[in-house]
Amino acid sequence: MRRFKEARIRKRLKLTVVAQTLGVTQPTISSWESERKSPSLDMVVKMAELYGVTTDYLLGRNTEFTPGRTSPIPSEILPTLDGKPVWIPEHGWALVNGTSNSLLFADGKHISFEEVKSQQLGPELFADFPAPSSIPISFAKLPSYSTIWIEPISKDSEIRQALRGRYQVKHGYAENNCGNRFSFSSYEATWLAFEITE
């Protein structure tokens, strides 16, 4: 018996958040959870990463709830994680400061994003705000996309959560179905764009 719904509920994620994060519709997630349809292998892997469990657990191959290992994140997305903790293998836990493009450690030490070789997110840290797992789209390539996923750069987690999601690329800006817009002129200062994979 598959555990897609059980894993989502343990992670305290709403269907809407899971659907947006995975780039599918809510009915699709519901059909997977009720076992009317089966997700692709790629989607099973993405769900396991999102829920912080193993693929074996999701597919019902073991009965033990095993949190997944922490996963590396690209340094280019650090500005979108302002105020969030990240694990730096060489130094330990740090808080992201998106304003100064640095990491703050408990001893008061600051390290710039450029000085960090790798960083990881713990599986339980971002239940309410899953981080993107790919490198942002370069500014030069933005106009070549029709639809993108936007992650706002803001200290206010409620603003980030409300404005993140799918946007249509227009001439000089990106706009979502609610009329929210992000201007290309503020790219990398107030927002980052990511490819949407189905």
Image: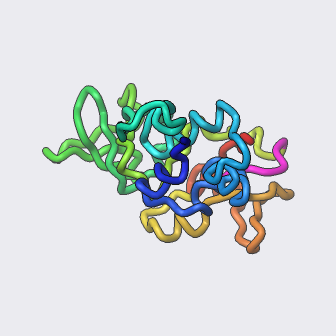
Segment colored magenta = 144-151
Q: Residue at x 30, y 49 (%)?
A: 95
Q: Is residue 111 above or below residue 175?
A: above
User: Residue 139, how many percent across, how many down?
Assistant: 70, 42
Task: Find residue 32 and report its horizontal and vertical position in percent.
Answer: 66, 48
Query: In the image, 132: left or right of 38?
Result: left
Asked where in the image residue 184 lies, by quadrant, the reply is bottom right
Queried whether the magenta region covers residue 155, the answer comes back as no
Q: Report if residue 71 is visible in the image.
A: yes
Residue at the location (54% across, 41% down)? 1
Q: Is residue 35 above or below residue 174?
A: above
Instruction: From the viewer's perspective, tell me whether residue 92 is left or right of residue 49.
Output: left
Q: Position of residue 119 (x, y in %)?
A: 38, 33
Picture quarter containing residue 144?
A: top right
Report the number of discs. 0
- Any magenta on residue 148? yes
Residue sitting at x 53%, y 53%? 5
Please report the residue visible at 57 percent of the width from the left and 69 percent of the height from the top.
162
Q: Position of residue 178 (x, y in %)?
A: 74, 74
Furthest residue in direction bottom, as rendered: 178
Asked whether the viewer can see residue 23, the reply is no
Q: Is residue 112 above or below residue 23?
A: above
Residue situated in front as seen by the camera: 43 or 153: 43
Q: Classify residue 197 as left or right of residue 103.
A: right
Q: Residue furthest front?
A: 1
Comparing 141 with 67, the one in front is 67
Colour convention of the picture: rainbow
Q: Is residue 198 left or right of residue 108?
A: right
Q: Main secondary structure of the magenta part?
A: strand
Q: Dividing the image into 4 quarters, which one contains the C terminus?
A: top right
